[in-house]
Amino acid sequence: MVTTNPKRVMTPVDRKEMRVSSRSFWTDDIWYLDNPKPGQKNVIYWKYLLPDGSWTTDPENFEILESFREAFWGMLSDAGWYGTTLAVGGMENIATGARSLFRWMNYRGLRSVGDLTPVNQNLYLEDIPGIVVYGNDFYGERLRDAEFEPDDFEVEEDDETADVDASQSVEREYEETYSDEDEGEGEGEVEESERDQLTWSKVTARIKPIYFLFAQKAKLAARGFGFIQNEPFGGRRLNKVTGTIAKHTLNRIPPLPDEVVGPLLRIAIEWLEVRSADILAMQDLLLNARAEREDSGNYLTQKAGRVKAALESYQFLDGSNIYEPWGVKNIGGLGQRHPAIILRYCFNRLRDACVIVLQYLIGIRPSEVCGIAGGMNETTGLPTCVGTIRLRSGFMEAFNLISTLSKGVERLRLEEWSLACRPAGSTHLPLTVLALQVLERLMSPWRKLGGYDSMIVGLTLAHSFPYSPANIEPVSVGFLGKHLKIFITREVDFSGLPDKSHRGESLVEYRKSGGRNISARHARKTFAAFILETRASLLGAVKDHFKHMSVSTTEGAYFPQSTRMRGDINSVGTLDSVSMFMQAVRGRKFVGRMAEAVHRYFSGPEFQGNVDDNDLFKKIKAFVIKHDLRIFFNDHGKCFIKVDPLASRCRQATGTAHIMMTKPDYTVRSPSMCGGCAVFAMDAENLPFWKDRTIRYASDAEAARKDDREHEYRVHLARAQQAEQFVKLLTDFEDDR
């Protein structure tokens, strides 16, 4: 590719001693940024392989690398033209997009940001679908050696890290025994369900860096680097540019169907209630066997031998042993591996099970799970994050979770979430409280080793347990999301799911993917749907529980159409819809472009024949709920926009036609427009409107003709003719009744 950037003289700037955080310098290959918000990894990797075989840190790539660093660093403090500064927590996802842009520039032969001309910007847009869908394969054989992205690199091995051979212990826990087919998104985009989806967030992440580079062009120019001369993409806004690639992709995460969430929670609860006691007991044995001793040696191999012997001698509560725990052969696909490896697998799954219980039964965000502080209250015997209160009646005791709220607030603050209740005086621990207690016991030794305050920490060894604090890390939202997928893949079997749920929801994708399409965000949606479907009047309580500023936020994002329809089946609009469809089954005729579809569908055998009104009502009611087919009734007819939102003429007229736009646009809608709309129909009930319209517009047109001003009333004449045609059709149907 020919570049257009003129030869420039770079201004020497010494950045070697410049700090970007308490842990990192400007020239470091990895920036560990300071951020108090829990659940955010806050790491930017600057060294990765490029399509031409070079590394980003090689001398020939110096200008682009430094330009990217200048742009990102500048966006944290002064967004300039862009207007909004970057939050540290959002840097990692944008860095993923920057990596795509950097590699693409190298692939296309661009040597400077100044080479991102309008022509090359448009070429990048054309290539983004291939980059997202095919990943490194987009570049052919050039990146086959880059098997892992930078955020998947291994940590350096510690001399004293494991209870098994060192060769088995150098991988990061994030990879575990998770196969390439099983692996989910990288941590920067972990909430997407599939690697090859061209989603709005993935496209946006890859386009944003160009806007940032333009916003920081003064910094690039000051260093003598090339810069983008004019506003990117011809001055179009980011969402408009993204829309040209991912036009109809929305981040709408539905609640999980009962047939999916049921098995998931059943397995998680089994790990928590049945298996946790054995796992905690074996962890105590491991820690005791690794303790310093005078009589049996303290070399790593000697400690590993003691660990192996202790775990092999442990008898499970059900009588099984470490090689077939709870009667499960080949658990985790580990076979007869070292007992410490099997224990580590069980450790991971118990942690995941506790997190699943917390997210699905409390509805807290992954970041709020990461923000839970560790520690045990010796007085109550509960984790310090659990508070209790006697309710006013005096008969019940309530439990509250204390964690850090970081989303939607300017500053971090502690908040409380309702956990559970129990009868006053009872010693029974509700499931959510038990999950926190087990997590505290499970994580306490490793949290103390790493010197962290958060309840949950990550162990960076794949197969065993660390000795060094260097192998303990805070967990991130991405970490939780990735291990949710591992838990589902290894422990939950969706192969027997039918095609449809009992409510008519499709289960095919859950069955085909083995649950890989389930993300961490499903938990909150499923929790809200269960509460609000049970009792819609609890919407305000859910709003308070979710710490939303407005009930409209809760209603819009967490009270899905299917739930609202089930809750509102007795509303006038819904009952009218059911009644109208019943009349269609019983032979009522309709006029309009939607009429044929209504007649064709309701002539099917499931609605015809010897069906009494009660059974018919139930069938049509289920049909309306399943497809959210409430009709918008007007004097002039019925709007079926929910059947095909993209075909709506009023939405097309305002440029807002979209699969999610399921209400008419009342700002432009008119009877004439509706009359020719593909999702509109009329019946005899609308005849009075069209008769009146015919008389009114015909008289206006006739008066204009007499005054020789007929040309001024051509619209009136056209409307009268249209109305007259509808009157004739509707009258014919009325006469046939």
Image (spheres, rainbow, N blue to C red):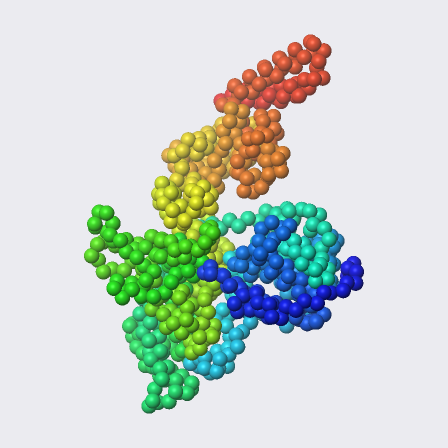
Would residue 427 be seen by someone viewing this image from the given angle? yes
Q: In the picture, residue 316 is in which quadrant?
A: bottom left
Relative height, residue 634 to residue 314 (above, below) = above
* 650, 207: nearer the viewer: 207
* 181, 29: nearer the viewer: 29
| Residue 317 at x, y percent in the picture | 28, 72
Left or right, 4 with respect to 435, comes to right
* 292, 496: nearer the viewer: 292
Would residue 337 be seen by someone viewing this image from the given angle? no
* 135, 238: nearer the viewer: 238
Residue at 63% in and 34% down: 653
Left or right, 67 with respect to 333, comes to right
* Residue found at the very far top of the displayed protein: 706
Residue at 34% in and 86% down: 293
Residue at 64% in and 19% down: 716
Left or right, 79 with respect to 187, comes to right
| Residue 333 at x, y percent in the picture | 45, 73
Residue at 43% in and 34% down: 574
Q: In the picture, residue 113 is in which quadrant?
A: bottom right
Q: In the picture, residue 133 is in which quadrant?
A: bottom right
| Residue 161 at x, y percent in the picture | 45, 79
| Residue 244 at x, y percent in the picture | 65, 48
